[in-house]
Amino acid sequence: MEQQIYPAFVILEPIIIYALMRLEAYAKDIIERHEEKKNLQQRLFGFLMRENMYVNMPAEHPTYKVRLGMTYPDDEETLKGVYRSIYNYFPAQREFRYHKELGLLDTRENICSIGGPVSNGIIRVGMGYAGKQGQLIRTDKPRTDLPLVFDLANPDDKEKATCIEKGGWRFTQPNWSIINKETSEPYKPDTRSDTYLETDYLLITVKPSNLTKEAERREKVHGIFGACHGVGCKAFPKVLDDLEILRKIDEGKGNSKYFQSLIKVPKIKHTKKESVPGNPEHVITLPLK
């Protein structure tokens, strides 16, 4: 019986068609995920793209001293990440402005604050903490309705936590934690036997501004990206780029445009130059009234 020979293209055609279909489906999925991510970023953090948004950096710290004009390296790194995120994700064509001192801020407008209540006076006011500039805040009861707060009581009694700030600065301070006031559940970063951090917690707060009466009247937004330690703050740009975390934040906040999200920062690596956060994990998101 004579063997029938088929041209190569006849044999390969189904394979090529299948491969093209798979490639098309993959590309469609990538495009859809990108669009979903962009929509979530703008829905959750849209205040970052507004013309009248100011960024405020820490200007003080009771245990970490820097020369005049400098900023805290990890918070500066967070700022750079927020800067990249704004121009990568948000269609904002404007100059990116940030100020460290209260007198240079227009607190009647939208404010984005980086750091924590120990080092950032704007965050202290926004989260209801008392305490003079440059002093540790010895209270765990801030005057606020926020459900997630930093536990800053009795700093002298807390265990120590060490990380490497960007540029190689070795920094040891009390191992601050975060408390859910509604459940009394604490979230304390893990440390090794040599006090170096293994994990950290990032607290994202998007709330109505209470910095001035005019900001309240005009319904301005105060966004706070703070962590127990500097390395946790550096994880915020990773949160912006994680579709699954953005989905969980959006689900957790419900119909409210204001919320708090607690993010765990695991697998911290310490090098000679800096402490590097691992991929963030969503813990809980609570809507704010």
Image: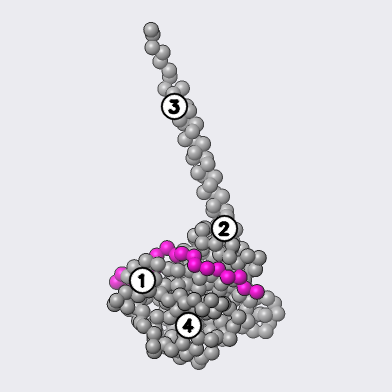
| Residue, disc 2 | 38
Q: Quadrant of the N terminus?
A: top left
Q: Earlier in the sequence, mark 1 or mark 4?
A: 4
Tell me: 32 left or right of 196.
right
Give the number of the mark in front: 3 or 1.
Answer: 1
Whether residue 55 is visible: no
Give the residue number, with chain letter if any, for mark 1: 198
User: Depth-wise, is mark 4 or mark 2 nearer the camera?
Assistant: 4
Q: Which residues are magenta?
A: 271-289
Which residue matches tag 3?
Answer: 12
User: How far is mark 1 from mark 4, CA to CA?
Assistant: 19 Å
**Which residue type does callout 1 highlight?**
Glu
Residue 15, given in percent of the width and then of the height, sits at 45, 30
> Quick one: label 1, few (<14), some, or many (20+) residues within 10 Å?
many
Q: CA distance from mark 3 to mark 4?
A: 65 Å
Q: Amino acid at mark 2?
A: Lys
Q: Looking at the figure, which quarter contains the C terminus?
A: bottom right
Quadrant for residue 252, please give it: bottom right
